[in-house]
Amino acid sequence: MSPKKYRTHQSIGFIGLGMMGSRMIGHLKGYAKELLIMDVDTVRAQEAATRANGRSVSSVNEMANADIVVLMLPNSKVVDSVVRGEQGKPGLIDLLSTGAMIIDMSSSTPSNTIENAALAAQKGLLYMDAPVSGGPTGAESGKLAIMAGGTEEDFLHAKPLLDRMGTNVILAGAVGSGHAVKALNNLLSATVLAATSEVFAAGEKFGLDPEVMQKIINASSGGSFATSHTWPKAILPKSYDFGFALALMHKDVGIGMSLIESTGIKTTLVNASAKMWDRALKASQPGADMTEITRQIQKEAGL
Ligand code: NAD
């Protein structure tokens, strides 16, 4: 096999400037000669362009000459529409030139990612997944954990760009592996959050002070990201605004569960957690934060 021809990092495209993308873009200021920014919400695109000293564009067509295009979009349905095109409109794979790379940093479905990578390869393009963990705080500080999927060679090509946005940039395996480990991580974290919510509700009903309980459990074997981050930030102050949408967590739980089903292994605990997240989403208002599940559990407990 002849060695791959990589393009430079001189022209970077970034699509999706929401809660995460709007913060990640700040770290790309001055990285490339050209930074092209796009979001269906043109106000967000413009604000990001100002922040990162880039240029906001109104369609993917204007990214045709980009060397690398980063995606930070809500889900695989949206990613696929941008990558493959829809309703007669071209997608990135129809527009980009040979050797250009698409890096999907969204939390997407691994099987869709593998399919997109195959379609991209047919056009001489490179495709990687590089989802993140660390939320808006990690995005703002440039300290995201980034779990990549792709070949070692492609990973080394992408790494200088990923290093601008994260501190823990790890190759998880072949393309799709980053999205797989991301979904499994969030399924685990969602299950721990649901369990912690039930345990804290029981403690409070017993008469324990939630702040005291948090201090003790966080320093003990039951401690987790939920007790170290979620409780102090969004549960103890009763703001229920951690900064990660319930709908996005529900999506990740669903991806994790379908991955588990595809392996054929039988699980019990995460199935119960997935049902809780289904119920929480149904009972919530659009735009609710993931900590809405805790509020609902507290309400059911009469707290
Ligand atoms: P978000 O909904 O805040 O942002 C998504 C952005 O994509 C929005 O600005 C939206 O206008 C834009 N968009 C939607 N469709 C588009 C299209 N067709 N073309 C261009 N732009 C389009 O979501 P977010 O919280 O920033 O999350 C982005 C991704 O990162 C998701 O996949 C999410 O699961 C993942 N993630 C989020 C967090 C978090 O804490 N928020 C943490 C880790 C991973």
Image (tube, grey):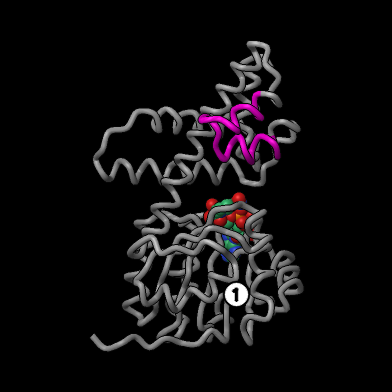
Please name whichever residue, 39 or 151, is drawn nearer the observer in this view of the structure.
151
The location of residue 204, given as percent across then percent down, is 66, 17
Residue at x-position 61% and y-position 29%: 294
The location of residue 209, given as percent across then percent down, is 71, 19
Q: Is residue 100 above or below residue 228?
A: below
In the image, residue 77 lies in the stretch drawn in magenta? no
| Quadrant location of the N terminus in the rendered image | bottom left
SS class, disc 1: loop
Most common secondary structure along the magenta stretch? helix
Q: Is residue 257 above or below residue 117?
A: above
Q: Which residues are magenta?
A: 213-234
Residue at x-position 34% and y-position 46%: 259
Label 1 sits on residue:
59
Please name whichever residue, 51 or 227, is drawn nearer the observer in this view of the structure.
227
Displayed-image quarter of ligand 1: bottom right
Q: Is residue 190 above or below residue 27?
A: above
Q: Going by the image, does 181 lie left or right of 286?
A: left
> How many residues crowd mark 1 within 10 Å: few (<14), some (14–19), many (20+)?
some
Please name whichever residue, 87 or 204, is drawn nearer the observer in this view of the structure.
204
The answer, for residue 87, to whether it is visible in the render is no
